[in-house]
Amino acid sequence: MKFSLRKAWTVASRDFRSYFTSPIAYIVIAGFLVIMGWMFFFNLSHFSMQNLQYKQFGMGKGMSITEGILRPLYGNMNVIFLFLIPFITMRLFAEERKLQTIQLLMTSPLTLFEIIFGKFLSAFLLVLTMLGLTAVYPVILLVCGNPDPGTLIANYAGTLLLASCYISLGVLFSAMTENQIVAGALTFAAGLFFWLVNWASQSAGSFWADVLDYLSLIQHFGNFSQGIIDSADVIFYLSFIGLGLFLTHRVLDSYRWR
Amino acid sequence: MIEVSGLTKFYGPRTAVSDLNFTVNSGEVVGFLGPNGAGKSTTMKILTGFMPASMGTVKVNGFDVFRQSIEVKRSTGYLPENPPVYLEMVVEEYLKFAARLHDVPKAKLKSAVDSAIQRTGLTQVKNRIIGNLSKGYRQRVGLAQALVHDPKVLILDEPTVGLDPVQIIEIRELIKSLAGQHTVILSSHILPEVTATCQRIIVINKGQIVAQDSIERLTTRMRQGLLYQMNVRSPNEPGIKALRAVPGVKDVQAAGDRLQIEILPEQQELRDRLVETAVRENMGVLEFSAEKLSLEEVFLQLTTKETNA
């Protein structure tokens, strides 16, 4: 199958711009930054208080910034993305189908996959923008302390991959319905499910425990949060994204046959 | 340019169109005429590659719509029933997007958009947000979108819906001006629209083609199916019966002293015999006149035939 990144980019840039011509981007970004800022402030003040106490009692050279601030910060960021990404992705196909603008895309010389990837890319770029804006926190830490840059990079990479998995789910559910609320709710539910799926692993047999652990999106983030970029985790995330986009292709293709 | 053979589409158990066969030559403007729900939009969606057919083949510009859909889509402009406009976009920006989607090279982008804006009369609103435009302007933006890549084939689904009379005339002129360089199929349920713009019509009803011919031929053919109006002094049953018995008469209806005589299509001149019969039956002819069927009535006859039969 032919795939032209340029055509996907045409779709992506229109959708990305449309986030900013509607209130969506501003609300999502503002909400995200307020929550992240609050968490960073809270983590930082909590950390410095604890650090002070440690030092007063003469317990070594204090705590690590990486462990005390960075890891909880990015762990929390993933939870916030779980909540926010459905709002970003829910319109991608649902709105186009409702307003029938999808007819323009479907009767233009584009392959279905170029359209889908374009949609995915537009949401990905918005998430990338949001992540970029949070770079101010590590910069503050780098100025005032000595966080481990490797861990920092791994956390960003992991967060981006994890967020892309949510986007992929969001694109899929947005293609399944004309109703944005339904698309958003399903995306959130599915995202949460793949987050919590390994809760059952404690009571499952060892084989199934492994399977459930493997399927859990958050389980694969563990290594990233510790500064390890393991190809197994990267491949898991990429296959998750790929599967979501592939299923979207099947869903959209099936509409044409009804 | 467009070859349709055996085109059939099922929506579940319902047949939307069945066994359509027609060809449209290069540079021709063809009207697709039929009442609501006749299968016009379905046919157009298949022609544009939006939807695959259940059976049959469609070739546009020599390419199979299903197997070589990208090539077909590149050379086709499509205006769906509802113009596919993004409400939050500015007109010019939207047309640029549509042009880019249709592989208009970067160097020609500006001129392609400008010419589409100019041809559809959007110059005054090109910097406005589409969502703030009236229905008529949105329809024009939709049309500009279909034209922007200068396609060989234009498929317009009810292009003048929602426009005011002045705009309708402008758009019809525009469509007429496309003849020659572009092959146009437009659908409509309004007859004057088709007569004003098209060289040929295909009348479709309940998913089947009931007539396809040039407008002149279709009208003359049907004109011979005439309706006579006869006013008589004293209408009587035997007289009406005698009129009905005249070969070539389809039906006679009496409303007081006014008789409506319907003649089967393609009959020879019957006026002499009708008057003769009426006089012989002592009805006393006061007035006799012929009513020609307009194309409107032809259309009605074609599309309601099945229910009458």
Image (tube, rainbow, N blue to C red):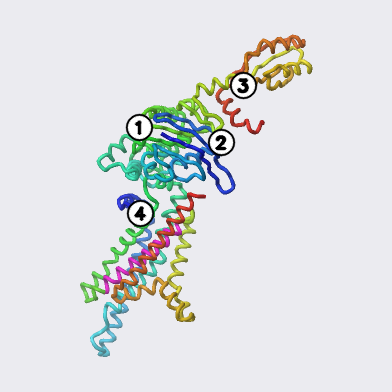
* Residue type at the position of mark 2: Gln
Q: Is residue A85 visible?
A: no
Q: Residues within 10 Å of mark 4 (few under 14, many from 20)?
A: many
The residue positioned 38% from the left and 32% from the top of the image is: B182
Between marks 4 and 2, how big is the CA–CA gap?
39 Å
The relative height of residue A169 versus residue B75 in the rendered view (above or below) is below
The residue drawn where x is 45% and y is 81% is: A206
Label 1: few (<14), some (14–19) or many (≥20) C-alpha neighbours in 10 Å: some
Q: CA distance from mark 3 to mark 2?
A: 21 Å
The quadrant where residue A85 appears: bottom left
Three-letter amino acid code of the residue under disc 3: Pro
Residue picked out by circle 3:
B265
> How many angstroms separate mark 1 from mark 4 (CA)?
31 Å
* Residue at which label 2 appears: B208
Chain identifier of the residue bearing label 4 in the image: A
What number is the disc on residue B119? 1
| CB within 8 Å, label 4 to label 2 | no
Chain for disc number 2: B
The residue indicated by pointer 4 is: A118
Residue A19 is drawn in which quadrant?
Answer: bottom left
Disc on the earlier residue, 1 or 2? 1
Q: Nearer the viewer, mark 3 or mark 1?
A: 3
Classed neighbour count for the residue bearing mark 2: other residues with Cα under 10 Å, few (<14), some (14–19), many (≥20): many
The segment highlighted magenta reads A151-174
| Residue A95 on image: x %, y % | 44, 52
